[in-house]
Amino acid sequence: MNITQTYQTDNDVESTPAAPSAKQLLRHILPLFRQYRLRLFAGFAALIVVDFLQLSIPRILKRGVDSLAAESATREILLRYGLYIILIAMGVVVLRFIWRYMIIGFSRYLERAIRNRIFAHIVKMDTAFFEKRTTGDIMAHASNDLNAVQMACGMGMVAAVDALVMTVAAIAFMSFIHVKLTLLALLPMPFLAIFTRILSGRMHRRFTTVQEQFSLLTEFSRSTLVSVKLIKAYTMEKFQTREFDKLGRKYVKSNLGVARIQGLMFPIATLVGNMGMLLILFFGGRLVIIGEISMGDFVAFITYLYMLIWPMMAIGWVTNLVQRGITSLTRIDSLLKERSLLPYAGEEVEKQEQITFELKNLNFTYPSSASPVLKDFSLTIGPGIHGMTGRTGSGKSTICKILARLYPVKDDSLFFNGLDVNTLAVESICANIGYVAQEPTLFSNSIAANIKLGKPEAVDEKMEEAARLAAIHEDIMAFPDGYETIIGERGVKLSGGQRQRLALARALLIDRPVLIIDDGLSAVDVETEHQIFAGLKEHLQGKTVLIVSNRLKLLTMTDHIIVLENGEISHDGRHEQLLEQSRFYRSMFAKQMRESEQLDYK
Amino acid sequence: MKDFGYQEDSTTAPLGDFNLWGRILVYCRYHWQLMTAAIILSLLITGATLGLPYLIQTGIDGYITNSELEIAERLSGLSMISIIFFGLVIIVLVATFFQVVTLEYVGQSIMHRIRQNLFGHMLKLDPHFFDTNPTGRLVTRLTNDIQNMHEMFTSVLVTIFNDLLRIVGILIVLFLLNARLALVMSIFVPIAVIITQLFARLARAQFRRIRSQLAKLNSFLSESISGIATLQVFGRQKETRKLHEKLSFGYLQRNLDQIKLFGTFMPLTEFMSSTAIALILWYGGSEILRNQLTLGELVAFLSYMRLFFQPLRELAQKYSIVQSAMASAERIFQLFDLKSDRILADKPHSAEDIHGNLQFHGVHFSYDGKHQVCKDISFTIRRGETVALVGATGSGKTTLVNLLLRFYDPQQGRITIDDIDISQFSLTNLRQLVGVVLQDIFILQDTLLANIVMDTGTSRQRVEEILAQTGIDRFVDRLPSGLDTLIGEGGQQLSTGEKQLLAFARVLCRNPIILVLDEATAAIDTESENILEEAIAESFANRTSLVIAHRLSTIRRADTILVMEEGRITERGNHDELMELNGHYAELVAMDVYNEAT
Ligand SMILES: Nc1ncnc2c1ncn2[C@@H]1O[C@H](COP(=O)(O)OP(=O)(O)OP(=O)(O)O)[C@@H](O)[C@H]1O
Ligand SMILES: Nc1ncnc2c1ncn2[C@@H]1O[C@H](COP(=O)(O)OP(=O)(O)OP(=O)(O)O)[C@@H](O)[C@H]1O
Ligand SMILES: [Mg+2]
Ligand SMILES: [Mg+2]
C-alpha cells in the first residue's frame, strides 16, 4: 500500500521460470487493459504529469533562493514564487486523485472481472471438479489470490511506472551533464537485473507454497466449522485445534521462506543504488580533484543521482508485489483452465412430455477412485415409477447422479429419448429433470425462497401446493414466521425430515417430466411417508420417476423395482418376482415384515 | 436463549481504539525482545541511510573541493570516505535482511497466535452461534481478516517508532536553528494530526464496510459451492451468477469509495509539505530581507523541512494500513468477546463410576423462545435398558439428543445421569459419557482411521476388529488404501450409507456409558442393519441406549417405546403394550406393514 517506491520492467514479468507462459497469463488480464485503456491512459498521464510537476517545485524554490542570494528579491517576488508552489501543489493534489482513482480503480475493476469469471466458471463445472478442489481452496483463490493480483495491477503498476519515469528523467538529466559519469553510475544495474532474475524464480516457488498453505488453512477451518457438532459431540476440539496449529505453523514457515528472499531483494536493490553513488563519489571525486570535471557539474550530478536511488530502493518492493501477482494469477489460471467435461454447447432439446433414459453398457469410474462403480451397466427407464434398492455402496446414488447429468459419461452410453446425451446441451437436459439428492443442500434463505429455487416466479399457491404434496405445509405454518422463516445455513434450523421434505417440495414445484428421488424420505416417518406417496402417485402420472429406497413399503408402491448389487443389476421386476428371485429382497422383506406377523396374531 | 447478537454489518458498534490497541499489544508482548531488536535494527538502518548523504557532503566539502589540501591527501581522504560509505551500505544490507526476516517472524507468529486462539475460541462457542453465523463469514475472519493485519505487524508497528523519533528529532533541530520559524512550522503538526484523525474515522468506516462485504461474498461463494449440484440441476447457474455479480459489484463500489477517500486525503500531506516550503520561502525570505535570518539558515531549514515531512508522509500512509488492519482486528476481537452464557460447573463432577441411569425431568425447551419444541418431557432409562423414540418428523426427537449433549440447555426441567444434573459435569466428560450417532452425517477431512478413532486413541487392531464385527470391513476393503484412505471433500467420497456405517464404527470405538442413535440406520440396507444390530446388542448389552428411528423394525426390540407428537410424549410402553393401546403407535405399525392388497 505504499507508493513511495518503484519499478518493474516487463522483462521481469517474463523472466519467471516456473510460471506458465506469460502469454497464457496475460490472456486473463490483457483484455481488461484494453477495455479500460482510456481510464488507464488518463491515470498514467496524470501520474507522469505529477512526476514532472514535482520536479518543478525544487526549480522554483531554487530560483527563489537564487534571487535572495543575488539580493534581487522583494517580498512580492517571494510571494509570487510561494503562490506558484502552492498552485502547483494544488494541481498535484487533483492529479493524484485522478491517477489513484483511475489506476487503483482499474485494479478493482480488474479484480471484479476476474472474480466474476471465476464464479461463472465454477458454476459450470461438473461434480468431479469439486471432488478435486475443496471449497476452501476455491475460496482462497477468490480472496487471497485475487487480492495479490489486484495489488500487482494497482499499486504495483503505479510504482513501476512512477519509478520508470523518475529513472528516465534522472538518467536524462545526468547524461545531459556528463555521459561517462552516467554510465559509471549505471554500472551496477546489470547486477540488479541478474539478482532479481535469480531471486524471483525462487520467490515464485515459495509464494506458490504459501498460497497453497493458505488454501489448506482455509479449507481446514471451513470443514471444521461445518462439522462443529461432530467435533463437539466427540470432544475433538483440542485435536482439531492441534491440527490447525500444525497447518498454521507450516504456513508461518513457508512465509518465512518468502521473507528470507524478500529480505535479500529489498536491500540488494538499495545496495545497487548506493553502489552507483559510491562509484560516482570515488571515481567522480577523483576526476574533480584531478580537475577533469568541474565542481559544479559534479554537485549537480550528485543531486540527480539521489533521484535515482529512490526508484532503485523500490525495485525490491515492486518485484515482490509483481511476483505475488504472477504466482496468484498462475493459480487462478490453472483453476480457470479446468474444463467441465459436460457438454455445455451441445444441441438444445425441446421440453418434452415423455422421457426415456437408456443406459447402455455403461462403465463408470469416479475420477477420484481406481475401480469402476458401474460395470457394463444397461438399464432403460421410461415413463412410470421405478424403485431401486440395493446394499449400501452398490451404486444407486451413482446412477441417480449420472442421470441428473452431474458426472460426465463416455459417448454412446447414456441416451435421452434415443439421443446420445453428449451431443445435447447439459442445461437443456437438466431442464427436464427434478432431482432430490440423498443429502440435499438447502440455502440459508427463507423457506419460500428455498422451495422456489427452481422457479422463483411461481405464485404462492403453487408453492403451497408443492409443500402440501411433500407434507411439509403444516410444519411450515407452525413456525412463527411461516414461509418466511430463515432456515440457516444448510437448513440447520430444521429437523432432518423437514429438510428432506423441503427438498422434495422444491423438486415438485418445478414439475418436470423426470423426477429422481434418491432416498429422499429416509428421515421421514412412515405416516408422513405414506401420506406423501399417496398424494404423489397422482401427481406423477405419466412421468419418468426413479425412487431409491431401502424401505419395502415404499418400493411396493412402485411399478418396477431394480435391485442393485456391486454396480450391477442383480434382479429387476415387480415385487412378487423379486420375492422369488432376489435373496437380498427376500431378506429385506423378512425383516420389515416381522411387524405384520406380530399384527396378524394380535 | 440469549441471542449472540453477533450481527456483522457495518453498523456494529465499533470497539474503541484504545481497547483494540491494548489487545493487539497484548499479543505483541510475547515477542518484545525480537520487536525491540527490530526497532534497534530499524534505527540503525535509518541512521546509516541518513549517514550516507552526510558522508557525501563531507567527501565533497572536506576533500573533493578542499583545495587547501595536497592532491594525494585529498585522494586518500576520498578513498577513506568511500570505504566508510561502502561499510555503511553493507550494514544497511545486512540490517535490512535481518529486520525483514525478524519482522516477518514476529508478525507471522502473532497472526498465528491470534488465528489459533480464535479457532479454539470458536470451537468453544455454542451450536446456537453456528446456527446463525454462516461458515463463510467465520472462515473469512479466521483467514482473510487475520491476513489483513499482516502489514500492520510486519511493516507498521516497528517503523512507527522510527518515524515518530525522526519527527521529534527534526523538530528539535528546527527549534535549535530558529525558534520562531520552527514555531510557525509546528502548526503543521496539529493540522496533520487533525486531518489524519478525520481521515482515520472515515477510512475505518469504509474499511468496515469493505470487510463485511468481503465476508458476504465469501459466505455466498462457500454456500454456492456446497450446493453447486443442486444449483445446476435446478438450472440456477445464471441467477446465482447474477447474485454473485451483485455482491461483487457491491464490493467494487465500496472499494471505489475507499479509493476516493484515499485519493482525497493521501495527497494532503504532500500538499502540506509544498505549502510549508512556499511559506518558508516567503516568510523566511522576508526575514532575510529584514536581516533576521541568514541565507544559509534558510537553505538548511528547507532541507530539514523536507526531512520532516517525509516521515510524516510515511506515517500517514502507514496509518491507512493501520485503519484497514483495525477494521479487521475489530471484527476479530468482537468474536473473541462473544462468550457462551451457559453456566458451567465450577467443580465438575467426576465422570468415574457412572452407571448411566438417564433421566429427563419435565424438560421444556424452545430454540427461539417462541416456538416450544419440547414440552414437559420426562422419562427414565436405566442401565441396560433400551428406549426407543418414535414420532413424526419435526416432533422434537433430535432436540432431546441436543439437550442431552448440552448443545443447548433446557429452559425448564433437568436432565440427570445417576441423579447428577448433567450441568455438573464438564462438557468434555459429559460428551465422553454419551456416545452418539448424529442424524446429520459429518466427515472430518482426514483418513478413515482418524475418522473412526476420533479422540479415543483406539489401536488400529481394535478398529479392525470392530470393522470386522460390524461387517463394515466390506466397504473399507474397497477403498484404495483401506483405513488410511483420505476421505471427505478433496479425498475419497463415500456413499451416504457408508458414511453412516462409519459413524457407527465411531461410536463403537468409544465404548460410552450411554448410547444414542439418532436415525443411525436411515440410509443403510437391511442386511447391513442386521449385522449392525447384532454388534450393538453385543457391545452395549448392559449400557443405557436411546434409539431414534422411523423404521419400526429397528425399534421393536426396545424395552420402552416413547411416542412423541409435537414436542410431547403421548404414549409409552413396550411394543405389545402400545399395540394393545391401539393408539398412534399401532396406527404407525399398521401403516408400515406391507399389505399384499395394495
Ligand atoms: N437449531 C434450530 N434452531 C431453531 N429451530 C430448530 C433447530 N433445530 C430444530 N428446530 C426445530 O425444532 C423442531 C424439532 O426438531 P427436531 O430436529 O428435534 O425434530 P425430529 O423429531 O428430530 O425430526 P426428524 O424426525 O425429522 O429428525 C422442528 O420444528 C425444527 O424446525
Ligand atoms: N464421488 C465419489 N468418488 C469416488 N467414489 C465414490 C464417490 N461416490 C461414491 N463412491 C463410491 O462408489 C460406490 C457407490 O456409491 P453410491 O453412492 O452410488 O452408493 P449407494 O448405492 O447410493 O449407497 P447408499 O445406499 O449408501 O446410498 C461406493 O463404494 C462409494 O464409496
Ligand atoms: Mg446413495
Ligand atoms: Mg431428528
Image (cartoon, helix red, strand yellow):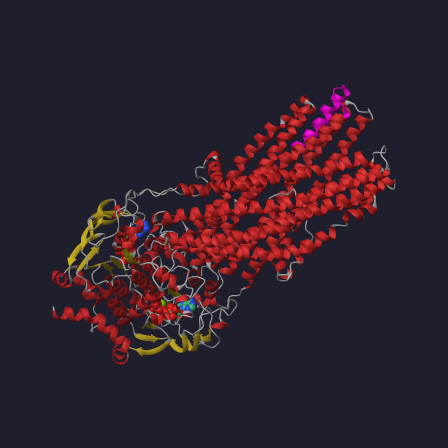
Q: Main secondary structure of the magenta part?
A: helix
Quadrant where the C terminus of chain B lies?
bottom left
**Count of numbered circles on the image:** 0
Question: Of A406 and B429, which appears nearest the observer?
Answer: B429
Which span is picked out in magenta? B272-295
Q: Is residue B138 above or below residue A569?
A: above
Q: Residue at x 27, y 75 (%)?
A: A585
Quadrant where the N terminus of chain B lies?
top left
Q: In which quarter of the image is residue A54?
A: top right
Q: Residue A575's spot in the image, x, y percent?
A: 26, 76
Q: In this view, does A88 lie above or below B184?
A: below
Query: Is any part of residue A510 visible from this angle?
Result: no
Answer with left or right where residue A12 lies relative to residue B551. Answer: right
Query: Is any part of residue B200 visible from this angle?
Result: yes
Q: Residue A167's spot in the image, x, y percent?
A: 73, 46
Q: In which quarter of the image is residue A569?
A: bottom left
In reply to whether residue A386 is colored magenta, the answer given is no
Q: In this view, does A126 lie above or below B366?
A: below
Q: Quadrant of residue B572?
A: bottom left
Give ligand 4's quarter of the image.
bottom left
Answer with left or right where residue B58 lies relative to residue B389. Answer: right
Q: In this view, does B67 lie above or below A461?
A: above
